[in-house]
Amino acid sequence: MRVLHVAAELFPLIKTGGLADVAGALPGALAQAGADVRVMLPGYPAILDSVLHQRRLLEIGPLFGAARVTLRRGQLPYSHLPAYVIDAPYLYRRPGGPYQAGDGSEWSDNLQRFALLGWMAAHVAAGELDPEWTPQVLHAHDWHAAMACAYMAAHPGTGAASVFTVHNLAYQGLFPHHEFAQLGLPVRFMQSHGLEYHGQLSFMKAGLKYANRITTVSPTYAHEITTHEYGCGLDGVIRSRGGDLSGILNGVDGRVWDPAHDTALASRYSADNLAGKALCKAALQRELGLAEDARAPLFGVVSRLTAQKGLDLVLAALPALLRLGGQVALQGSGDPVLEAAFHAAAFSHPGQVAVRIGYDENLAHRLIAGADVILVPSRFEPCGLTQLYGLRYGTLPLVRRVGGLADTVVDAAEPALAEGRATGFVFEAASPAALEGALQRVLQAWARPADWLRLVRTAMAQDFSWAGAAAKYLALYAGLVEAR
Ligand code: ADP
Ligand code: GLC
């Protein structure tokens, strides 16, 4: 099975969130399962600097405002998978993030930048750019890669099938409608049954309308996005795809997230030898200036600071959490209002609340290992990876029952508790009162060390490997290829 994965970020080369973790792990898991997998990435400096053995395949242009576009083929470091890199200096070679400049503003030419990504991928799928290799399936991730599905639909001769994965419906890639002419698509793609979305152009809709199959990253989110509450205005479009949509849960990359081999930690540990976890907690408390107290339950947060993540609930429940004797360690960045509020909380409660604003992969590992509980109170969560990392590290997730969080954490209530299936704490309403109720249950369990230990061991025994997800994607690809 030949599959081309198209994504705008890929761990460890460039990452803003869980999408990079998935793009960094799923292609390798598919290759392990026997598929012939390649990836295609925009040539940001971080990609051009890290992809190995690059050679030029061809040069084209002008395209989407770039005078010259060079398609290179190389090899990803670590996984050694073949990678196509689009070198378009005018569009991609600049300092800053993949979607935004250093000051947080969206790049003004994102329409051109991600139309080019989709266009190149579709033309590889059509066999027009690399005579040596043509995929049977093009798998596009999120709105940044979604235009590949529209360009494939515009080339009905393309033999490949398309799969579009929604990682987050809230980010849609909306652009002014008058820019349609720049996309080089037939006029029918401009209409409301095409890319038009309330007078704008939606790249997300390109995936939702034109992909042969749509997946999202958990079964519960696959259902939720067909509803008005979670559909971000696209639920009607999604419902119209009927059975073409399914949910496949993300996995954990055990090469990156494994407490027994994690070199970022003060001490390594496993379910059979948890002494190292206690050392990680003490080291984290020291590092962050928290009171070095093994008996205080330490609540960790590693997150983008956006409305999605429900961290306003943590701020509202903070007085109760501290009254109960808890500590909080937060690492994140994003919304300046949330950043300032957490800074203020740390300032008011030295020794009990520690906040690190910024992005630091190693600190994320130390924090997830050193905390007792990982807090993920999201308002919506397509899958969520930090609660999976928490499970793996014996750091019990406290989550809201939504999206992938609902699919991955078993609440510590009867009968799951007695049956030894419980792995964390789950609350329902997105309200401070509901979170406070869950915090009280955490403290009750914390007061019973034998029960806590059992929860930790059950959590660490969960298997969210990528191999299982890869098998499901392969079955989906096989069905599509067979049907063509
Ligand atoms: P999302 O993709 O919505 O941000 P996920 O839970 O799927 O949420 O993935 C988040 C990923 O980003 C995880 O790998 C998490 O450890 C990482 N992450 C988030 N914020 C930070 C940060 N400030 N520093 C380091 N890693 C972070
Ligand atoms: C998105 C979602 C997150 C998911 C990640 C990877 O960023 O917000 O829930 O885990 O994609 O699929």
Image: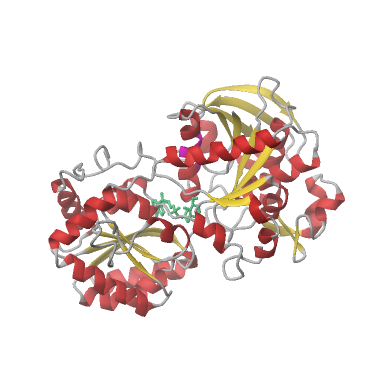
Given residues 285 and 20, the one toward you in this image is 20
Query: In the shown orientation, is residue 84 left or right of residue 431?
Result: right
Given residues 174 and 289, the one toward you in this image is 174
Q: Quadrant of residue 104?
A: bottom right
Quarter of the picture holding the N terminus: top right
Q: Quick check: 226 above or below 136?
A: below
At a point 35% along the width and 80% down the height, the residue shown is 433
- The answer to whether residue 96 is magenta is no
Measured from the top left, where is residue 309 in percent x and y? 44, 64
- The answer to whether residue 25 is magenta is yes
Q: Quick check: 341 above or below 270?
A: below
Q: Quick check: 87 above or below 392?
A: above
Q: How is the image coloured?
A: secondary structure
- Residue ranking furthest to the right: 187
Query: In the shown orientation, is residue 156 left or right of residue 79?
Result: right
Measured from the top left, where is residue 346 in percent x and y? 29, 69
Query: In the shown orientation, is residue 202 left or right of residue 9?
Result: right
Specify the principal SS of the magenta part: helix
Q: Evaluate whether residue 351 shows in this view.
A: no
- Residue ranking furthest to the bottom: 433
Range shown magenta: 23-27
Quarter of the picture holding the C terminus: top right
Given residues 54 and 67, the one toward you in this image is 54
Q: Evaluate whether residue 478 shows in this view.
A: yes
At a point 15% along the width and 52% down the height, the residue shown is 278
At a point 72% along the width and 48% down the height, the residue shown is 210
At a point 35% along the width and 71% down the height, the residue shown is 314
Measured from the top left, where is residue 338 in percent x and y? 42, 69
